[in-house]
Amino acid sequence: MREAVPDAEFTAFTVRPADTEARHGIRAFPLRRGADAVRTAPPAVAAVEPRPTSSARSTLRRIPGLGFLLSRAAAASRRLVDWSREASFWVVRWRRMRGVDLLIVAGSNQLSDYYGGAWGFPYTLWAWSLAARLAGARVAYLSVGAGPIRERRSGAILRAALSLADYRSYRDVGSCEAIAAIGFPGPLVRAPDLAHGLRIAPASGPASDAGVGAGMLVAINPLPYFDPRSWAERDAAVYSAFVETMAGFAKALLARGDRVRFVPTQLRADPQVIADILRAMGPAADGATAESLAPAVTDFDDLVAQLTAADFIVATRFHGVLISQMLGKPTIGIVYRRSTRDLLVDVGQGDYAVDIREITPALLLERLAALSRDGGAKDRIQRRLEEYRKDLRAQYATLLGIAPHASSRET
């Protein structure tokens, strides 16, 4: 967008505005009022001694039905306060949209109720889209991911949000099917993920000289699958089984003389998972230290350096797979959501999409061996990536067509 409209002004609406401003150098404002309700875990509550109940309260509680009525009145009062605060934030949304030419909704699984239900992502997207239209701005949903959408009211809210847009495109087959399933009429335009438009300069030389000259270097990108600390569905047993599997896979690689690097692509949750995997591995093989197994990754350049140094990559996150492919790296995708499988299938690498519910160290080793024999994979992927970039250039041209005066105001 900067290349197409050099004098455009950009503003972001995110759950962590300060972080966005620091990383991207643009103005940013809160996406929601208050704390990030769909991702912030509730604070721990210390045990306290029960307060002595006054005689008056004890007497009132003995009146049949009064306790129930009082509790309903208190709940209604809380809802009234909540609605009042939300009404105030509607004014904030409208004011932020004044002077904006184009509101772009972009990103991974935006059209989903997995985190926060209908009042999480669906309501937030509808509210900002409506505020934009009321303020005279155009709205575009650009290469967004969709699903899961589990509640009927989520589908209704998302249909309302999408109906406010001047342009809509979805990043994969599964997303198009999810939107069709909620009854949105379309057209269901499929466009590549926006990250395919990045110009990534591979790092020169290895990211670390630890263990150079041993076997191949395998970069592993884990994620907090069902982790009680951060996943929407929380199951400690499922998470523990995933951690043990990844630890077993890494130990098997080290035992046969290969090298391993654990690489986060999300800096809040992934490092916790990596720490858990390292603990599950116990004493590592000769020469492998915690520093060599989990080198520091603090920004995108660090990530690219680590992935560039690898011979093979095993990634669980969608963009871990995508960026690895863009760097020309043979990649196995551990699939926890359909979008990763769709991506691998679309570049002719469907054989290397492995269901996260079925992974074992032996299966991952077998797929890694098959990938190492697939000499034509890199050329096939690069040809497809060029097609993605061409499609994205065409999409940006279409986008500028719906906001012809974006250069004079704000995006």
Image (cartoon, rainbow, N blue to C red):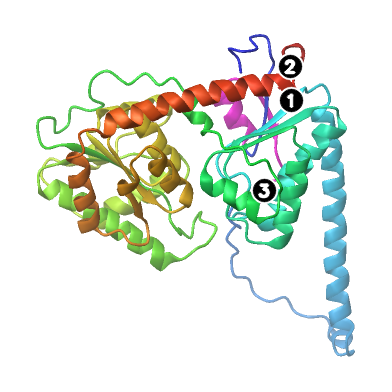
* Helix, strand or loop at mark 2: helix
User: The disc labelled 3 sits on which kind of residue?
Assistant: Phe
Question: In this image, 258 relative to 162: left or right?
Answer: left
Q: How busy is the neighbourhood of tag 1: few (under 14 within 10 Å), some, or many (20 plus)? A: many
Magenta range is 16-39
The one of 221 and 357 positioned closer to us in this rendering: 357
The number of discs equals 3
Question: In this image, 330 relative to 156: left or right?
Answer: left
For the question of whether residue 250 can be seen, the reply is yes
Residue displayed at 76% across by 38% down: 128
Q: Give the image location of residue 256, x and y in percent.
A: 10, 47
Q: Quadrant of the C terminus?
A: top right
Q: Where is mark 2, residue-wise?
A: 406
User: The disc labelled 2 sits on which kind of residue?
Assistant: Ala
For the question of whether residue 56 can be seen, the reply is no
Q: Where is mark 1, residue-wise?
A: 102
The one of 167 and 108 positioned closer to us in this rendering: 167
Answer with mark 2 or mark 3, whichever residue precedes in sequence.
3
Residue displayed at 85% across by 53% down: 83
Q: Where is mark 3, residue-wise?
A: 121
Question: In this image, 128 relative to 264: left or right?
Answer: right
* Quadrant in which residue 67 is drawn: bottom right
Residue displayed at 57% across by 61% down: 44
